[in-house]
Image: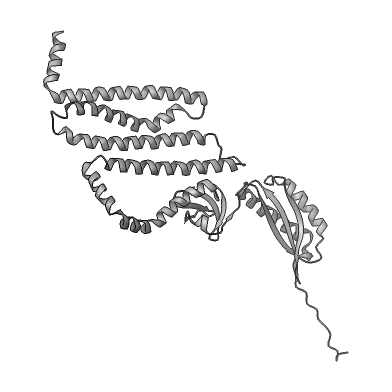
Amino acid sequence: MNLALQIDKAIQNTPGLSIGLKIALASFIGVMIYFIIIKIISKISNKKRNISGKKIAQKIKYPFVLVLMILGAQVPIATYQKEFEFLSYIKPVLNVLLIFSIAWLLIQIVAVIKMIMVTKFDVSDSDNYRARKAFTQIQVAQRVLTFIILFLAFAASLMTFDQVRELGVSLFASAGIGGIIIGFAAQKVIGSFLAGVQIAITQPIKLDDVVIVEGEWGWVEEINLTYVVVKVWDQRRVILPTPYFLEKPFQNWTKTSADLLGTVYVYTDYKIPIEELRKFYEELIHKQQLWDGRVQNLQVTNATSDTVELRFMMSAINSPVLWDLRVKVREEIIKFIQDKFPEHLPRTRVELKKPDNQD
């Protein structure tokens, strides 16, 4: 008992030790609160089977503990602030750290919400139109919220300092001209930001859409607030500003669905037996696993002085599969004509007339 009293008296006579112990106790309580909350989240997430509590804990662990520790540290600092002047300089720093820690925690919570929502959709599925649409909206919404959180955190941190607050009031008095100058300077940035939000809402493009832009064929790999990344078929990346997809025409092959129609053009002589070739094409396309079974036909779409144009129509579940199907069909048709009807390949005819003055 005497030992406990002596320890208590020593702590009271040593303010630095008292502050340290209170901070340590507050931090310990904060960590315990964190583990209790994580346990509750784990149970809820395991029941819904959307995402494991372990993944959620990994996302919010560090910012959550940091927020609780800073809150705990502010209690003894506020208690002894009048007695120790140096603590008055520490408090504003802790306030700024607390603001950005809360912002970090909110950003991680937004990321967790995105993780939970994304698990409901499978982008890798062959019919992934709804999944890509939802994923695009979720991703852009996450980035917009992250930007807003950081902006508000920065603004709130500045307002914690009296000098900066007074400076802000004085600047507002002459903000008219400055606002116009800044507006002109930042109009492209603001325009790109608003274009990114508009793309998320109207969705002229979605993630994994097949597009043709600037003469390049590729997939939409990333949609950011200010730019879009298109992955070209040869692994190159085309970086385009977001207003491009609102101001300029472009082709979107998967705007409403991933399935596509494709064609193969073959040019032959006039004497080619169309019906026999049509029968071969029907047998050929039904053997192809890449064909989705929707569309197949053969039509004569043009005739020139030397050749006839044959169009072989086919369909597939998406553009990469359609490309492989077209290549395979083209190869087999050319091979068939070479083997069965080599005399009906395109040729140039020349008619020679005998002169009238010769016998």
135, 229: nearer the viewer: 135
Q: Is residue 190 left or right of residue 124?
A: left
User: Farthest residue in the right direction?
Assistant: 359
Q: Which image quadrant: the C terminus?
A: bottom right
User: Farthest residue in the front direction?
Assistant: 173
Q: How is the image coloured?
A: one colour
Asked if 150 appears above or below 236 in the picture, the reply is: above
Q: Is residue 206 visible?
A: no
User: Farthest residue in the bottom direction?
Assistant: 357
Q: Residue at x 51, y 23 (%)?
A: 47
Q: Position of residue 184 (x, y in %)?
A: 37, 59
* Quarter-of-image position of residue 161: top left
110, 298: nearer the viewer: 110
Q: Is residue 156 visible?
A: yes
Q: Position of residue 342 (x, y in %)?
A: 77, 63
Q: Which image quadrant: the N terminus?
A: top left
Q: Position of residue 338 (x, y in %)?
A: 74, 60
Q: Is residue 304 left or right of residue 79?
A: right
* Quarter-of-image position of residue 353: bottom right
Q: Residue at x 59, y 43 (%)?
A: 129
Q: Residue at x 56, y 37 (%)?
A: 122
